[in-house]
Image: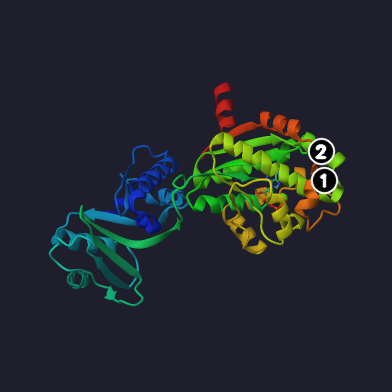
Amino acid sequence: MKFDHILIRYGELALKGKNQKFFINTLRSNVQRALKNYPHLSIKGKRDHMYILLDGEDPQPIINKCKDIFGIQSFSLAMKVENDEEKIKQAALEALNQDQGQTFKITCKRPNKHFPVRSQKMNQVLGGHLLTNTDNWQVDVHNPDVDIRVEIRHDATYITAKKIPGKGGLPVGSTGKTLLLMSGGIDSPVAGYLTMKRGVKLEAIHFHSPPFTSERAKQKVEDLAQTLTKFGGEVKLHLVPFTEIQQKIFKEAPENYGMTIMRRIMLQISEKVAEQKGILSLATGESLGQVASQTMESMHAINEVTNYPIIRPLVAMDKTEIIDLSKEIDTYEISIRPYEDCCTIFVPKQPKTRPKREKVNQFEAPIDFTNEIEKAINGVETVVFNASKSQKDDEIDELL
Ligand code: ATP
Ligand code: MG
């Protein structure tokens, strides 16, 4: 008998009372989507765990794919046997024989109280059985090389060896949707990742200013969106033409308040796009104290234009922590490509680091952006990215 399935543990998910079924179904469809190259595998979502029947497949690539899915606390390779003492003994022995080391421990749990032998007793029975039937293994309950876990559940008994950690978090799609303001920088993709970790599905919005920003700068943002699909499935990227607005700010607003005004307009447009899509929050990669736009005063001045909740997962993180995370999620190398973004082109030489609401309102009052904002929103181009490839690729495929 070989390990014939992968056991998936939910962790936090199990606490969610009435919503549990919804959470489990969301996770299940996320797993299914990640494994769409294995359509023959069956994935079963139970109340307290999920499992993937391996059907002879090599488990390692499957586990690797599932390691990117939020909502999974840990995995184990597992064998499923009937709730029968003799069969459990036999399977535990086979699990040990497939592992390597010198010492082992048995950890038995019995959520199914109808099973007649108590966990402590089962530990002894199984430990004895393994010692009698192997040559070189010894028991070490404190620091074993192999921990054989036996979970006697209602439907069956699961015998597992190594526990492999998952990503934790909540299944993406289980707690709503946000619109992420995504630049081509290091921070916003990491903010998107952390928002997804709490079960939030992403759409992204990017402001670009062609011809001042290049095709390659846009490509960079598209590549970032594509990378994020690995963790949360489909990501829609809304590209907003921002040139006219930036030129108008540049021409008509005092230079040192240009950045504050630009950020405020970005937020206004983002809120409108979110509203159109039925999305209830915005997310940004802002952190405190990094650059001029990220002082407390600046956030206060910028935030005035919207009453949408703004998720700022990085607000309390150090830059080094953010960089480490961006490397871990494979966005770093894309983010450091040197192409200009709309903010760097029109950035004032000396942006106001402590802007005031009264002042910014005073400067904005004589400038009417209504038409430009409407035009920008009407000019939004949306590109859809999926876990394997972008919709653009699909369109190209069709043409070929
Ligand atoms: P990032 O690394 O995400 O670019 P940053 O440290 O450069 O962040 P800022 O340039 O102050 O910080 O931008 C703050 C946030 O504003 C960004 O994290 C992002 O959420 C949003 N933002 C900035 N520029 C754009 C843009 N061109 N399109 C969409 N959102 C943007
Ligand atoms: Mg930036």
As rendered, which of 94 and 389 lies closer to the eye? 389
**What quarter of the picture does the C terminus occupy?**
top right
Displayed quadrant of residue 369: top right
Crowding around mark 2 (Cα neighbors within 10 Å: few <14, some 14 to 19, many 20+) is: few
Q: SS for tag 1? A: helix
Image side of residue 326 versus residue 163, left or right: right
Give coordinates of residue 133: x percent, y percent.
19, 69
Which amino acid does the dot numbered 1 rest on? Phe
Displayed quadrant of residue 212: top right
Q: Residue visible at 14% across and 58% down? A: 84
Q: Check contact, mark 1 vs mark 2: CB within 8 A.
A: yes
Q: Residue 363: which numbered mark, if any? A: 1
Identify the residue at the far top of this view: 399
What is the count of numbered marks? 2
Crowding around mark 1 (Cα neighbors within 10 Å: few <14, some 14 to 19, many 20+) is: some
Q: SS for tag 2? A: loop
Label 2, on which residue? Answer: 367
As rendered, which of 103 and 279 lies closer to the eye? 279
Which amino acid does the dot numbered 2 rest on? Ile
Give coordinates of residue 99: x percent, y percent.
33, 63
Observer able to see residue 63: yes
Image side of residue 173 versus residue 389, left or right: left
Q: Residue 83: which numbered mark, if any? A: none
